[in-house]
Image (cartoon, rainbow, N blue to C red):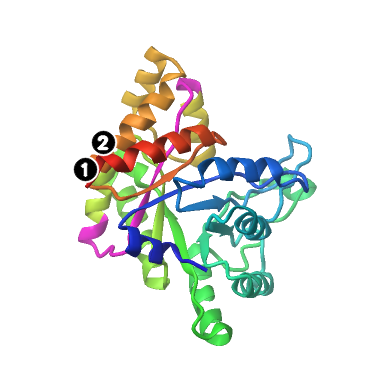
Amino acid sequence: MTKLTEILREKGRLLTTEFLPPKTPKLTPLVDKVLAVASVVDAVSLPELKANRTSVPRFRMNPLFAALRLRELTGVETIFHLTPRDYNRNAVAGLLLAAAESKLANVLVIGGDRYDAAEEISLAKNVYDHPGTTNLVKAIRELESEALGASRFCIVVGTDPTVVYTDNQDTIDREIEKLLERQDAGAELAQTQPVFDTRFFEFLDKARERGLKMPVLVGILPLRGKSDSAAIERRYGITIPSEVKSLLAKEGAENGRVLIVELASNLVKQGVRNLHVYPREDSELVASLGRSIFTLSP
């Protein structure tokens, strides 16, 4: 039971990644991906995805169970996702008690993409018994006090630094305020949506000035071209700089891998010690980054 914050204190840096839980009862393909990066990453995250109307099977394995089995099968530390979208208060408490008994120490708390009206009819309903991320973080800390004694989870929360690309100060201020509220509720680590250039530091500096103290895992993601960039923006509600889109359009989708390696190198050279790779199931990319990037820093 090793918390990410304990790994960070020991190593002075973190490298994490994520792979999707399977759509079938078969864990072998996922195990193979994790084993391919086991020597370079500090933890692997298992997202909590909503069901998908357009694919078959439409559902995925529970991330808590996948995190437990993956740790047992690979020896790699894991992070399970928990959303207020999918669980009522009783279900949240039951999952956390199971996680504590299983010695799963790390949980990423995010709001979760909402189901639209048609999805609510055919797949599942939005729960939000806990109204949002901050409320769920508070509930986890309350449950620890009530039932878990000295046991404490390392709670990771999300944030979106790409708001700096909008140049809208109100939008930037709102995102920073949400992050600070999550910190005050008991979060110990923040993981960002993918960033695409070093303007990320503008967001971080503003947040630090206003009281952000917890470490930040900086997210990076390989883009596959200009159309892919537009799809990513629509799906995740983030902003990608026009300069990055132009570069992808000029040089082609294959340049996405080159750009993410360059970005990771620049971030580390400028002092970033914690990275989260959104690999899009590309374990080779994660392994390559892990072997090279942190050798650039002292």
Query: Label 2 amino acid?
Result: Asn
Residue at horizontal 24%, vertical 59%? 208
Q: Residues within 10 Å of mark 2 (few under 14, many from 20)?
A: some
User: Percent position (x, y) of residue 47?
Assistant: 58, 50
Front in this rendered view, residue 122 or 1: 1
> Is residue 213 on the magenta stretch?
yes
Disc 2/disc 1 C-alpha distance (Å)? 6 Å
**Residue 199 visible in the picture:** no
User: Percent position (x, y) of residue 40?
Assistant: 44, 45
Q: Label 2, on which residue?
A: 266
Image: magenta residue range: 207-227
Residue at horizontal 62%, vertical 69%? 99
Residue at horizontal 48%, vertical 74%? 138
Question: In the image, which disc is placed on residue 270?
Answer: 1
Element under disc 1: loop
Element under disc 2: helix
> Is residue 3 on the magenta stretch?
no
Side of 19 where 262 appears, left or right: left
Front in this rendered view, residue 104 or 158: 104
Tag 2 near tag 1, CB within 8 Å = yes
Side of 144 where 179 appears, left or right: left
